[in-house]
């Protein structure tokens, strides 16, 4: 079982309009009560993204505050797409 997860913390409409393949969807304001749907491993690598990096930053801080040690704010969706295209 992989301990690396990608979570899109944007709205459901934003998620449905396009998201990274394999990413789960949890709106940033629901991340604390719903992270257990994805993993209960506090050491899992959790990549978070939104539109600009603001909401994913809030989600990162929230996860860290409840003991997740490896939550990473990956910034904005469009930037991630550009990075993937450049690889």
Image (tube, rainbow, N blue to C red):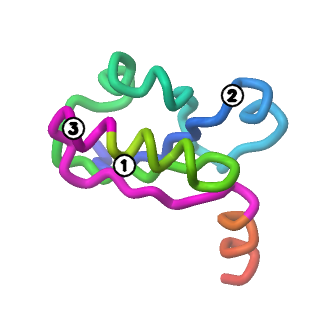
Q: Are marks 3 and 1 in contact (CB under 8 Å)?
A: no
Which marked residue is nearer to the observer: mark 3 or mark 2? 3
Q: Disc 3 or 1, which lies upstream in sequence?
A: 1
Which marked residue is nearer to the observer: mark 2 or mark 1? 2
Q: Say left or right for 46 vs 13.
A: left
Residue 46: give its label: 1
Which marked residue is nearer to the observer: mark 3 or mark 1? 3
Where, quadrant-wise, is the C terminus in this rendering? bottom right
Q: Which residue is mark 2?
A: 11
Residue at image location 19% in from the left, 32% down from the top: 66
Q: Residues within 10 Å of mark 3 (few under 14, many from 20)?
A: few
Which percent across, then down, holds residue 32? 34, 24
Region rendered in magenta: 62-78
Alpha carbon distance from label 3 to label 1: 14 Å
Q: Disc 3 or 2, which lies upstream in sequence?
A: 2
- Say if 81 sits above or below 41 in the image: below
The residue most toward the right is: 17
Residue 65: give its label: 3
Q: Nearer the viewer, residue 32 or 17?
A: 32
The residue most toward the top is: 33
Residue 66 magenta-drawn? yes
């Amino acid at each position: 079982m992989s301990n690396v997860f990608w979570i899109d913390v944007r709205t459901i409409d934003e998620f449905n309009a396009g998201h990274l393949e394999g990413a789960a969807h949890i709106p940033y304001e629901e991340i604390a009560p719903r992270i257990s749907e994805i993993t209960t491993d506090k050491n899992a690598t959790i990549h978070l993204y939104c539109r600009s990096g603001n909401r994913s930053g809030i989600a990162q801080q929230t996860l860290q505050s409840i003991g997740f040690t490896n939550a990473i704010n990956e910034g904005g969706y469009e930037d991630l797409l550009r990075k993937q295209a450049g690889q």
